Amino acid sequence: MSELISTIHLQRLKQLEDSFGHGDVEVTIPELAEVLFCSTRNVSKIMSKLQTLEWIHWSAGRGRGNKSHFAILSSFEELLLSKIQSKIRTGSLNDAYQVAEVFHCQEWFTQNLPKWLETFSENRDNSDDVIFLIPYPLERCHPLDLFDIHSGLYARVLFDTLVKFDPASRTFQPHLAHQFQTTEFGIAFRIRPNVHFHNGVLLTPQLVCEHFNRLRNHSPLYQQLLSAVDSFEVNKQWVEMRLNRDDPMLLHLLADIHFAIFLDNDVESGFPIGTGSYSWEQRSESCWTLVKNERYFGLHGIVRRADFWRVDAKQIHSEQYIIEYESINTSEALGSNDIQINGCNAVCFHQRLSQDIRELLVRIFKAKLRDNGNKPRNFCSTLIGYDNASEFDESESSEPSLEQLKTLEFSTLRYCVDDEAMIQPVLSYLRNAGVRLEPVSTFNQADFWIGDYSFGKDVLLGQYYWLLFSDYAQLILPVMMIQQWLDKLAMNPCLSQLFDHLERSCIADCRILPLWRKATRYKCHPSIKGNHPHSYGLMNLADIWLDKR
């Protein structure tokens, strides 16, 4: 109750300050009642309470019609600041924000939060709570459409899959299914009996079957990826996937976060309900919080709770608890703090372009981007980016003559590039050669575009998706060619060789030109430990802890 009284009387003080200012004030009881929005009988109670708090000096008038005197001793702004800072000292940021919200000071709060944390957070002994300042909003966090890289940070601890892929041994480990086996009809998964969603609903084989049936109907892509499955059936505690053919990629798919198990959220469709080691405590535009799932069946996270506060990037200094990711798409050499991640940027050419035009454009790209920048980076030799960047072959990257350009018949080249500076030398050369260029807003309208290829820890799955099922692949390769490769997939015992062959074919046919390996950089307070980035360049929240020693 004391917290409520304190906030109420802060409001009373603000009303007095807004109406009368500072200094000695002579006023009648009715005038005070009007300012304080109360009855005349309650004026003395309110003013006496404020005097007891030593916020004002109050001399009540004697008798009817006599005027009273009061003076404000502590300003509203000073008291509000003190109240908020006291809550921040104890780590009660949400309570502090609620106080600011009462007085419509949210913007002032977020502007000053970095400074307050820098001043007061070191006094906190609780290493189970961590506060992150972030300069970006909270986007949808849904396994089916993780378009925002930051959403992947949360999704990894919010959702679980039936099985997990271990990149070290290249094997699959039990997870939500604590046992799985091949059968004469396909694959069977024994669902753990003690797993609950974050809303308390028990995970059952029936819910798993319903989930995958919804998944298959979600989009043509999921229909294709799950086309080998005839049906999902319940057999006691088992989920049986009955197959119409062998599918060597099925377990790879089921271990991917895009196939995680979840319940739909009818209130906020972009934030479905998972079973992971952390759950949402609250979400708002300015702040969102993840808390440890104490009933989690697997390995718990270390941090008890993680608060994410959105603030202006200009307010953040390097010594604060911050997660800030920056994607690096440039031809210049990487710095010492840049983290290389699996994947690269690549020029993609639409299948409607002839072989001659594609070959010519590849030569132009190689010639014009070779010496671009003060510290140029060589092109990657693969989309994955594992190999060291390949040196240029001078014979392949020689600049074509204008006569060669004139022999090719095309009127307009449409292109889609987020940052034209990346390939400005190429665009300038083509324009000077008389080629008409037209920028378009989406890559499916373009003759060539810069593709953003990213690979997780299961590289095989990444190759499978990017080379055969992605929107890029549908535009780069003819339908018949994709089907031919899928037919080979069903008969080939060595998938890695097959995908490597497919990628080399796409590069040799000038359908894809890998550019520079992808990289990222992020800032994080030095007391945050365990923040080792994975293949996408993101840390795992379940692995971090706070060490102030």
Image: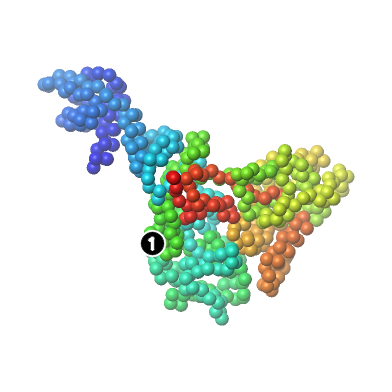
Q: Position of residue 421 (x, y in %)?
A: 69, 40
Position of 319 relative to 514 (above/below): above
Disc 1 crowd, CA 10 A, few/some/many (<14, 14-19, 20+)? some
Between residue 361 and residue 366, name the one nearer to us: 366
- Residue located at (50% from left, 36% from top): 317
Which image quadrant: the N terminus?
A: top left
Q: Position of residue 416 (x, y in %)?
A: 68, 46
Q: Left or right of 99: which side holds 412? A: right
Position of 144 relative to 546 (above/below): below
Task: Give the total of numbered labels.
Answer: 1
Between residue 219 and residue 108, name the one nearer to us: 108
- Residue located at (34% from left, 40% from top): 87
Kindly state the secondary structure of the residue where label 1 is placed.
Answer: loop
Considering every residue shown, the one lying at the far front of the view is: 549
Considering every residue shown, the one lying at the far left of the view is: 63
Considering every residue shown, the one lying at the far bottom of the view is: 184
- Residue located at (26% from left, 31% from top): 12
Which image quadrant: the C terminus?
A: top left
Q: Position of residue 73 (x, y in %)?
A: 27, 24
Indicate the colouring scheme. Answer: rainbow
Q: Left or right of 18: which side holds 442? A: right
Residue beneath disc 1? 295
Residue 327 seen: no
Q: Left or right of 386: which side holds 526? A: left
- Residue located at (33% from left, 29% from top): 78
- Amino acid type at circle 1 is Arg
